[in-house]
Amino acid sequence: MNVQSTANKAFSRRGFLGLTAAAASVPLLAACGGGSASQGGGGGGAGGTIKFWDMPWATPAYNDSAKKIAEGFSGANSAKANYQIIQWNNFYQTFSSAIASKTGPAVSTGGGFQAFQFDQQGQIAYADKVIEKMKANGQFDDFLPGVLDPFKSDKGYVAVPWQLDMRVFWYRKSLFEKAGVSLPTDWPSLLEAGKALKKVGAFGFATGAGSGNNYGNHSMIMMMVNNGGGVWNKNGELDLLNDRNVEAMEFVLELVSNGIIDPAAVSYTTDNMSAQWKDGKAGFGLFQVNVPQRVGDTSGDLLVADPITGPHGDKATIVFPNNIMMYKNTPSQEASEEFLVYYMGQLKELWKQKLMSALPVFKSITETPEFANDPNNVKIVKDWQPIAKTFASQGSTLNANLAALDGGQALNQFSQSILTGQAKDAKSALQTFQSGLESVLKK
Amino acid sequence: MTSTTAPSGLSRARRGLAPGGPGASPGKRKSKLSAQTTKTFFWLLLPSVVLLVLIHGYPLIHAAVQATHDGDLLQTGNFVGGENFANVLSSPAFWKAAQFTLWFTIVGVFGSWLVGLGLALLLRTKIPAGNTFKVLLLLPWVVPIVVSSTAWNWLVATPDSLIPSIFRGLGLGTPLFLADPTLASITVMVFKVWVSFPFMMMMISAALASVDTTVYEAASMDGASRWQQFTQITLPLIARSTYISWILMTIFCVNDFPTIYLLTGGGPVSATTSLVVLAYRTVFQDFATGPGVAIAFLMTMTLVVISVILYRQIRKSSVE
């Protein structure tokens, strides 16, 4: 008996090719398929209900609390708000497909430069009236210095900042004591501290650039900015090959060659980084706000360091001012504005409940006991916030191109080539970075 | 009684024929369907065809539009013809990703097939707790890729992870499995083989189960050695399943995004960036929709060509 005869009959050429074509088209579908979160009706819904989309900025408790705040909104003409969480995975696709199908939010948080991307596509409602209302109710004067300026474009305020994702240096006190070295204050002392920490089995410039981890990228840009350089010049033109950037990257390469940066850091996820801090392998390095809570060591051994001074006397770090944006597709622009003013006024609750892993934008929140009782928070507000610059440095305003920089392939490749020491030299690595970035930036 | 020599017996066995059987060659009878049956088939197939067109046709057309424009996810942009394809094909990043995809696919397909074949043959013999082993061996395929990639990350990511520690303990240094470009490529491929071998094992086990055991008895009587039985009987008889599994695994490997992205993100320094990862990063991280979709198109075309070639092999094997 022919054991395969049954299968032969059931397996036709056309059927097979159909199956093959269907399976093979998966990458196309993956590339252009719509996000699933675009359901729920267009234009923010009828009856003056403002659709507010928010991201998982912290633990689920944050979203629960933010939902309560949003749903507590009661505006003029019975305007209400509903709340929806949007996951970070493919979030830009989710927003894009929803906006394209007119089922997007009226107001949302989102990626740091998302507002500028959608503004470029004519989808953003400017927040000038919100700012006017905040001036009237006193909130405007409560903003920490300089946080609002990056959002002002020629046409108006593209979004309103609500939290500052700051990059600051942290250190583990016991490791410095064990190594018998002082905290670094400038680049030479950072190098010396790194060498001393290496002798006690710790790394003096902890970072990571593995899957989904942007701290390695941020460390590179931070060091450029800390040396008075940056990706853009004051006119907003791409300027990666300036001397300050070259000098900064030469220094980072020196840290790599001295083993002060973990050779495995290039593959570290944020979880790997957190574990390194928790396990006492990281002595000094760039991280976010609330590191002790994040890594699970609140013993007081993890502390915020002083900002370090670059070789030319510059002192700076980078900050991502996360923002809330309004869209043109809304049941009522007035209701959107009213909601945004209301929501900004309620932000204090989120910090009072200690739900946030970022700095607030309002001075009054930094003065609440819940925030000010943490000396690390106080130090960040006092010493780091005033020297913080955005990714747009040395330029002053944010723009859509920054989205292609942050998390884009050009920066990622650049950081990884530096961290692995594969870069031939700083200048050629920067040259490759500049070429890669030029190829994806919108003219 | 029919007397047969070893080679002719093996030849009959390859076709699944026992000794002394009728030995008729596989007929090429073509049953002519009646007009009524054809009509019934047409109406039965129509809903599926419409569904397929809706599900695949629209995205394909939309993707074709995006690939020939310079827009983004929200706006179509200006028509640029084949410029995106030309840019992609002249990009070193594309060819580097294509090279990695090729190796990833070759190792993924044949590595998992070899492991799957070995285990399927082993499980065919009577071993204690064989069924329990079968279930356990399915776990890499069954466990969500997010979980297994996290587990592998724990095993290899840092110098203090388990596997590097074992290497260190054996005096073999401390390999950086995900930080060294070559080792990261190997690790990702081994991970893919680990994830995929249960699928191959199942396919081959199913094929082996349908092989008439008397064929082996006959071959044995004809004096065929174990190796001859394996190469002249087992492999030809499972050839159809093998080719099908190769086609499917080729598609799985070329389209595999999570295995690579979750473990290495395509790094370090693009060492593990496959074409699908490159397409994703181009569209969603560089926001260059046209070139990203062009990459996906090129992948699709390549897959169709490979699939057709392998399909012809199946036809050939069934004729033999």
Image (cartoon, helix red, strand yellow):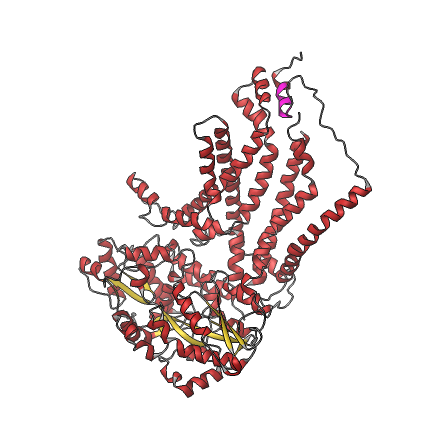
Q: Residue furthest bottom?
A: A136
Residue B39, quarter of the rendered image: top right
Picture residue at 33% right of the left edge, 47% below the top: B161
In the rendered image, the vertical position of residue A295 relative to residue A24, given as above or below:
below
In the rendered image, the vertical position of residue A9 relative to residue A136, given as above or below:
above
Is residue B10 highlighted in magenta? yes
Residue A355, quarter of the rendered image: bottom left
In the rendered image, the vertical position of residue A66 relative to residue B201, given as above or below:
below
Picture residue at 27% right of the left edge, 72% below the top: A379
Please tell me which residue lies in front, B303 or A86: A86
Q: Is residue B126 left or right of residue B203?
A: left
Inspect this view and state whether residue B50 appears.
yes
Is residue A12 highlighted in magenta? no
Q: Which residues are magenta?
A: B9-16
Q: Is residue B204 left or right of residue B11?
A: left
Q: Position of residue B5 (x, y in %)?
A: 63, 15
Picture residue at 23% right of the left edge, 63% below the top: A300
